Image (spheres, grey):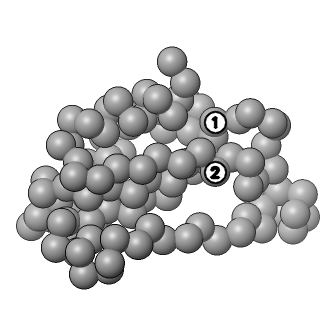
Amino acid sequence: MSVQAEIESKLTTLDPLMVEVVNESHMHSVPANSETHFKVTLVSTRFEGLMPVKRHQLLYALLDEELAGPVHALALHLYTPQQWTARGGEIPDSPNCLGGSKSGGKH
């Protein structure tokens, strides 16, 4: 199973009302077909009453194997249903990568 499919499978345990997992590895200085950089947008009632840091910790614990292995970067956009409705259901854009050979630095 691909890394993306593993992430998607594990996220179902949060009973998401909406979930999108995007492999953004192609936007970074990595080999073709890599699965190292992901953006997760997830809406769940499980986030109600949790501060953003607690939501992130919940996802980090859920995806600990992926983060210890192939996943280098994980952008998390985690919302309650009310927050999702308030933002009009718009998924945030990702910034362009300036790491690696693109800026002369390491990413």
- Residue 6 position within the rendered picture, expressed as x and y whole percent measured from the top left: 43, 27
Relative depth, front residue between 106 and 87 = 87
Q: Relative to 17, does residue 32 appear above or below in the rendering? A: above
The three-letter code of the residue at mark 2 reads Glu
Q: Which mark sits nearer the N-terminus, 1 or 2? A: 2
Image check: 63 left or right of 5? left
Quadrant of the image occupied by residue 49: bottom left
Quadrant of the image occupied by residue 63: top left
Crowding at dot 2, Cα within 10 Å, few <14 / some 14-19 / many 20+, comes out as some
Which numbered circle lies on residue 35? 1
Relative depth, front residue between 28 and 65 = 28
- Residue 44 position within the rendered picture, expressed as x and y whole percent measured from the top left: 19, 55
- The residue furthest bottom is 86
The three-letter code of the residue at mark 1 reads Glu
Residue appearing at x 42%, y 35% in the figure: 7
In 3D space, how far apart are the residues under numbered discs 1 and 2 (Cα atoms)?
8 Å
Callout 2: helix, strand or loop?
loop
